[in-house]
Every structure is written in C-alpha cells, then in structure tokens.
Image (spheres, helix red, strand yellow):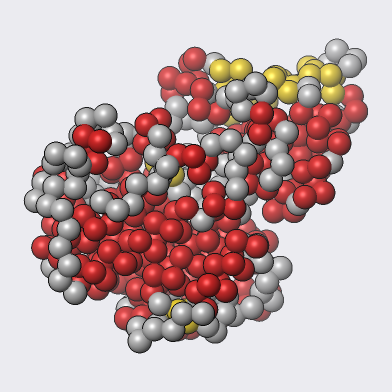
Amino acid sequence: MDKTTEILSKYTCELTYDQLPPEVVQQVKRTLVDTFGCAMGGYLSEPAKIARRMASEISSTSPSRIIGTEDYSSMDLAGFANGVMVRYLDCNDSYFSPGGGHPSDMIPAALAVADTLHSTGKELITAIVLAYEVFCRLSDKVEVSHLGWDQGCFSVIGAACAAGKMMGLNEIQMANAISLSLAPNLPLRVTRTGELSMWKGCATASATRAAIFAAQLASDGMTGPGEPFDGPSGLCQLALAGQSITPDVMGGDNEPFRIINTTVKNYPSQIHTQSPIGLALELQPKLNTADIKSITIHTYSNAVSTPSDAPEKWAPKTRESADHSIPFTVAAALRDGQVTPNTFTDSSIRDTTIAEIIEKITLKEDPSFTSRYSDEYNCHMEITTHSGESLVAKTSFPKGHKNNPLDDGELDDKFCKLAIPTLTEEQCKQALTILWDSENLPNLDGLFDSLVV
C-alpha cells in the first residue's frame, strides 16, 4: 500500500461525527440545501431525463431512490442519475486551490448509499465532510486540468471514500475501494474543451457511479493495485508529471475542514463568470445597451479567452458552452438585468442582441490578479458609452465566495427559485425544513418523499 492510499484509507475509517465542529455541520446543511436546489433545477433537462430513463430500467436487491421520483435503481445508477441533475445547471458549489472543481458532485454517492442502507443524517453528514476533505486536499496539490485530466479523477476518490465509509469498510477494504476507483477512471479534459456537449454536466456523475461500484467491489473482497498513486505506472508517474499528491494534513484536531472554504454560486454558470456577471449587473441599471461602445474586462489568466483561442466562448452554440462563457454571460446580464437558467435557452443563445454586445467585449489578463488567484477572484470592468461616459466596477470576491457568502435566507431563496418549476411552494418549504434539520434525520425517506415531482 502506498503512502497516499494509507493516509486516505486510515483517515476515512477513523473520522467520526463527534469530531465535526458545529460550523462544519452547519456548512454541510447549507451545502445540502444548495445541492438539492440545483438537482431540482436540473430535473427537467434532457441529460437528466436520459439518465433517469436508464436508471429506472434497472432493478436491484439493494435499491436506491432517484431524486424527484418514486423510482428506484441500483446504487450506482441512482448516484449517476442524481449526479446529472445536481451538475446540469452548473450552479452547484466550487473549490479551487488552484486545482479543484465542484465537490458537491460527490454528494449523490453518499445519498445513494445512505438511502439503500437507511443511514442517519449524522452518517450522511460525516460522509460528505469526508468526501470534501479527500477531494480538496488532493486538489490542493495539483491542478489536473493543466495536465489534460478532468476533475473527476479526484472526485471519484472522494466519492469512493464517502460510499465506503457509509458501507462500513475496514482500512484494507477502503484502500482497495480507493484503488479500484482510481485505476480504471482517468477522465480526459476534452470534456471541458472546445464546444461543450451534454457530457460536461455528466462527467462527474459518471465518476460518482464508478466510485459506488468500486466501494461495492471492495466490500465484497475485490482487491485493487496496491500502489495506485505513488507506485510504478501509478497516477503520479503517468498522469501528474511525477508530482506527489500525498496530503500533508487532513481536517480535524484543530486543522480546519476544507468544506468551509467552498464557494456557493450565485448564478447558474462557470465559477470564472461569477465576478464578471456580478459587475455587469451592478452597472446594467446605469446604462442602455444601445449606448455601449466598448466593454473591457480585466481578470486572472484562467478566466481569459479570445475569439481566436476559444471561439466557442465568443459565439457559443450550446447551453454547456454558453454557461462557461464570460462574453455570453456578461452580454446576457447587460441585456436582461439577470442571469438565470432561462438565460441559456436556445433562443437566448441565438439572440442577435447578445452577439452585438459580445462584439464590444475585450478580455485582458491582469498579472496581479493572476498572482492572487485562487485566493481572490478579481475582476475589473469598464464600460464606455458612445457619449464618452465611463462606468467602472470591480470585485475580489463575487457573491457566494467564502468572503462574501450567501446567508441562509439567500440559500433558501436560491433553492426555491431553482426548484419552483418542478415543486410547489409547500414542497419547497417542507424540503427546506428537513434539510436544515439533517443531523437529526433517522433516514432519508422523508427528504426524498418531499421532492417527488
């Protein structure tokens, strides 16, 4: 067993609910409100319909509930279907340090196992904290996207730890679950390159499915490679250019838990669009779009693109590309005074007004902003009008960042705005009451029942 596997398996088996400070438990509940809101908001999407159809065709002797329905599937396919719903809107949480992604993508793994095993709310909360800790600590070590890999290569490990924790695996079984989640599952960065497809919102759900399967295999005695991280032909040698990702420390014993450092999105779009959207909405009431002569946006390098190096961001053809586009989302914010899931309809994407505004946008890197990313998400926007007026706005922390968080009431509002197309107001109230009391749940039956469309 290599050092990384040993640390992760030991930590997974030893973490208990009693080690979690009150603020961490509260953050998990906030995250659950956010995650289920995103799931209900993504319920009607075509990828979610495809995933639910596939999952509902499978029966199992250990069934797990599909969110929004009374249908059951196998644990892994329920985790996949639920994961697609959570991820589709690109509105769930983010963590970058500088590596990272969307850690709540792993929550459907914990939910799927919890539903099957009738786990308590405390067990669910512990598994979620664990998943975040594993994913975030690995992401602290390396930015896998720069090496050609997608974020699922770490989320599959965190999700496997969460699933294995809820299944009660011992350290040897857990080490095998980690190995079995990693060795067969190295997702390619092409998922988030060029014109984006439906798979953009499904890739980490696929990692969730693989994670549950790995934990199931390990629980039944399957063994995996003993040195999946640090050994010859392991992850670090073949995929990470020799970089070690062995965690230096894990949450607990006065070391803060990483879930506290996540960003909750205020808009249904990529993390790098959050600051520009907020600034555009700040300036929008002060001008008429017809009066705009130019829009100059200064930000950090990860957020910068040009029409030549990323044409899909300057003339997106799919929802998945549009919600990853600063030019599109800024133009939409200036056009509508808001950015919501309806911003990304086919008719909105094709709107000539959007294209006209995009033509006036220039994105520039500010090296000082780049040097402070990912601690800060700096953005400076200047809009010049035909009359010569200059309107300026800037931010370091978009709404939802840990230094500018949504409060609990704003999270409730986000949940309801995303869920109302599928749930009644009464259902929203009922679900929120249950979610805010998650630590006292004897099982998840009442929660799933409250979300049936």
**What residue occupies the far top of the structure in this picture?**
388
Residue 399 seen in render: no
x and y, in percent, of residue 366 in the image: 54, 16
Task: State the residue at coordinates (27%, 64%).
Answer: 214
x and y, in percent, of residue 221 in the image: 15, 71
Q: Is residue 124 above or below residue 305?
A: below
Q: Is residue 194 above or below residue 364?
A: below
Between 61 and 118, the residue placed more toward the observer is 61
Residue 5 seen in render: yes
Task: State the residue at coordinates (54%, 52%).
Answer: 199
Task: State the residue at coordinates (53%, 61%).
Answer: 84
Q: Is residue 18 above or below residue 331?
A: below
Can you tell which quarter of the image residue 242 is in? Answer: top left
Image position of 93 (left or right of 25): right
Q: Quadrant of the C terminus?
A: bottom right
Image position of 359 (left or right of 410): right
**What residue occupies the far bottom of the structure in this picture?**
61
Image position of 36 (left or right of 116): right
Task: State the residue at coordinates (26%, 66%).
Answer: 215
Count of numbered circles on the image: 0
x and y, in percent, of residue 45 in the image: 65, 62
x and y, in percent, of residue 172 in the image: 11, 63
